[in-house]
Image: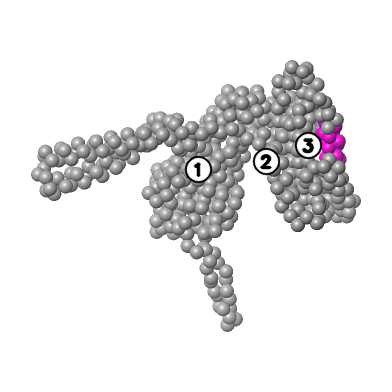
Amino acid sequence: MNYSNLFIQMRNFNCSVRAHSRHHLELKSEYPLIKDSGKTRYRMDLYFFFPNQLNITEKHFGVRKFIDNIKIYTRFSTPSMSLPMLTDSQNPLNPVSRIRQYLNSPERLYSHRRDLPIYELRVLTNVYRSELENTAELIAEEIQKQNRDTLCRKRIERLLSDIQAFLKEFRKLHSQFISPRITPAQRTALGWADESISISTERILNRLFSYAGKIEEPEDLLIKMEAVTKKESGYRRQMNYQYLYNDEDPYLGEKLAYRENILKKWAHSALYMTREDRKGSLRAGHFLGGAAAGIAMIFAVLVTIYAGKVFIPNTTPWVLAIVVSYIFKDRIKEILKEYFKKLMPRITADQHSRLYDPFAEERVGSARAYARFINIADAPGNIQQLWNLEPNPFRSVLPEEQLIHYQRITELNSRKLNDNHTRLNSTTEIIRFQIADWLREMDDPKDVFYRLENMKKIKIKGSRVYRVHLILSLRNDELLDSEEIIQYNIILNRAGIIRIEDSSN
């Protein structure tokens, strides 16, 4: 098989918004790496429209609190490889093939990168789990369709065959890791990867077991899946792994969940970039904000001195001149702060960080972000147009919604990332908003309604909810017409996120 064109060039963004928990809103964006570009810059603009009742204003809430409630993670997207590709020893992108090539390399090269087998094992664990989950999801979708039993049966049988072929090929590594050149850390990593792959196999087949039950005459498939899961359970016991079943243990579920989660985090850590937050931007922003306040104060003092020379002190004109000077002082301060931000965006960012590749141990990008409260009339025209399309017949009589604009600019060194990771075709940025502070001004969500029918009072359960409208714009600065806009309604009550509705269509 020719693997030279294995990874298709991506130019569209994958972006999703979901509830990570009742109090955490998660936004996940996938940024394609442009192969023929030295650097790639992505610009994300988020517009949060808050109901006036929540009192999320610049004075009461503030930009700093909004920024402090954000956590950001940047990682490499999991490479996509089918199970046959993971079994093919001729595939140069296959982690198993790379480990074997490393083990057969000369001593000087072998000892130079002792962390490479561990890195490849972690990547393999992520790729395998992702491939199984994606395949199971596709099969589940096919099962929901009518007259697809034959196709789904073949897909499941093929999956079972591919799984067993991969496990057989992968577990041949155990005999090669007996070499005295293998370090204890490398042997431990192989065991963790093997245990995690076994857990993923059993978990996915358990999920497919429920789906396959809907196929006509599924007994033979169910027997085969159960046989594979029992084989994996016995294999883990034979290898003395910790993810084992013991019905007499009252805390078995807790132990299994903990073990699976730890192994998953160990594998995932190979994908996450190291982030170095820069405090200089924050200090520079405070300094320039102070400079703006100082210039505005100088203006007010000069007007006061001038008014003392022109008008008699303590007279009405003298008082009016001083009051007007202080009104202009506040406006001058805000205008100068915005001007400084636009003039020197890199050093006035509310968030500024450098991104490092943990495997190559070198800088591969940077990110900076800004947040500000703006009037809806000051939002871009296309954002105002989309906001107005959202149906609300009471908008003209209600107080105007509060609008926070959050902009994030991410720059990636595509060439360096492609050189270090030949399987990589995109990076993923995860932004989590802690929304507990959004809920403080909300009313009690419980409410009761009644209707009369057949001489009886019928109770209707109700819940007081609030809607936060989110418009998301994402684009690549190097590509024309690359902007994508998505809209969401975030339904909240005092307990947190109820649901998220995609209102793009």
In space, the residues marked 1 and 2 are separated at their CA atoms by 29 Å
Residue at 56%, 49% (x, y): give it: 24
Mark 3 burial class by Cα count in 10 Å: few <14, some 14-19, many 20+: some
Determine which residue is flagged by label 3: 191
Specify the segment rendered in magenta: 160-173
Determine which residue is flagged by label 1: 46
Please tell me which residue lies in front, 268 or 266.
266
Residue at 35%, 36% (x, y): give it: 289
Determine which residue is flagged by label 2: 265
The amino acid beneath tag 2 is Lys
Circle 1: element type: strand
Please tell me which residue lies in front, 391 or 78.
78
Task: State whether residue 218 appears in this view.
Answer: yes
Relative side of 106 to 77, left or right: right
The amino acid beneath tag 1 is Leu
Q: Position of residue 424 (x, y in %)?
A: 67, 30
Q: Is 161 included in the stretch rendered in magenta? A: yes
Please tell me which residue lies in front, 351 or 466.
351
Q: Position of residue 468 (x, y in %)?
A: 50, 52
Q: Is 334 included in the stretch rendered in magenta? A: no
Q: Position of residue 462 (x, y in %)?
A: 55, 67
Circle 3: element type: helix
Please tell me which residue lies in front, 176 or 200.
176
Q: Could you say which disc has been placed on residue 189 in the image?
A: none
Quadrant for residue 322, please give it. Answer: top left
Earlier sequence position, callout 1 versus callout 2: 1
Q: Position of residue 332 (x, y in %)?
A: 29, 38
In space, the residues marked 3 and 2 are separated at their CA atoms by 15 Å
Which tag is nearer the camera, tag 3 or tag 2? 3
Relative side of 418 to 178, left or right: left
